[in-house]
Image: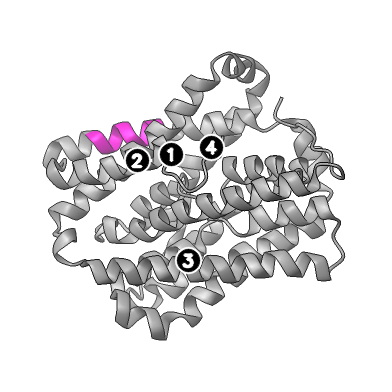
Amino acid sequence: MLKLFALDRFTILLVVMVILATIVPVSGEPAEIFRVVTNVAIAILFFLHGAKLSREAIVKGILHWRLHALVFAFTFIVFPALGLLAKPILLPLLGQQLYWGFLFMCFLPSTVQSSIAFTSVARGNVAAAVCSASFSNLIGMFITPVLVSFFIFGRSQHNYDPTSSIIEIALLLLVPFIAGQLLRSYVYPYMQKVPNIVKAFDQSTILMVVYGAFSGAVVAGLWHQINGLTLLYLVIACSSILTIIMLLAYFVPKWLGFNRADQIAIFFCGSKKTLASGVPMAQILFAGQPLGMIVLPIMIFHQIQLMVCGIIANHWSRQNKPEIKSSSVME
């Protein structure tokens, strides 16, 4: 499941989408039709995400409030603080649009699928990871627009109101998620029969969003604004913030007395950022902005976090095998 030091098929396809958008970008009326189709696919995707989450996981995980509070702190306090503190260094190196994208990445919630998968592989507290990652995504639908409004658009657009963006994000992501949760008993048995189709739809939706985002950016002159050195600075910035967060997510839970299984869940849930929710949110929050510049940092960070977490999860899996038993909550 985890391919170390190698590009998996999904990552290769992400690169292909960027290349395709560069060569054959969608624009004009076809772009508007493509956007509508993509939004429908996103709504279905989050409906399926809601159907995946078991009620037992919610009940079992929701009581572990200390763990969720710490993951929340890493995701929505420490990450944004580091992004803001890095402004004097990154703004001159990356330029305003890429720095906005980097800061937006810092404001995003945690991942769901990969956080759970890595926690399971490393033999951590899977139930807590399911709850924490899912709640992070739900809360992020409200917190991320507020952070973007206050720290990105606060000075450049004094009349920017996040309320409409929150409502739009809720309609696109939250309402389908809740519907999936309510209809789980009817939907999930069918999802179990076709897991490969569900996974393919999940990844295809993200690929569609990335293609649409980069098409708009290419039409607006993306590759005339970014050079190789700027990309290198961005990779270094993403790698640096991931290193700092991972060190904190590794040592702080130890200092606070969490057991080993909880430490693993906190580490993987608190150090990651979501691409699946991030790109749709960017489309809404940064409408009219060069979207490719905004989503490029999260795409780069996404691949780095998967590679690093894959290495660590496999190492901990061998290390923790005699001590920690993993439990399955994804019924």
Query: Which labelled disc corresponds to residue 12?
Result: 2
* Mark 1 vs 2: CB contact within 8 A: yes
For marks 3 and 1, the one nearer the N-term is 1
Residue 203, image x, y percentages:
42, 34
Mark nearer the N terminus (2 vs 4) = 2
The kind of residue on which mark 3 rests is Ser
Q: Is residue 39 magenta?
A: yes
* CA gap, disc 4 and disc 1: 32 Å
On residue 8, the disc is 1
Task: Tell me the distance, in whole angstroms, between the alpha carbons under discs 2 and 4.
Answer: 31 Å
Disc 4 is placed on an element classified as helix
Chief secondary structure of the magenta portion: helix
Residue occupying the point 31% across, 79% down: 93
Assess disc 4: are there few (<14), some (14-19) or many (≥20) residues with their C-alpha within 10 Å of its C-alpha.
some
The three-letter amino acid code for the residue at tag 2 is Ile
Rounded to the nearest angstrom, the CA distance separating label 3 from label 4 is 34 Å
Give the x, y percent position of residue 131: 71, 44
Q: Which residues are magenta?
A: 34-41
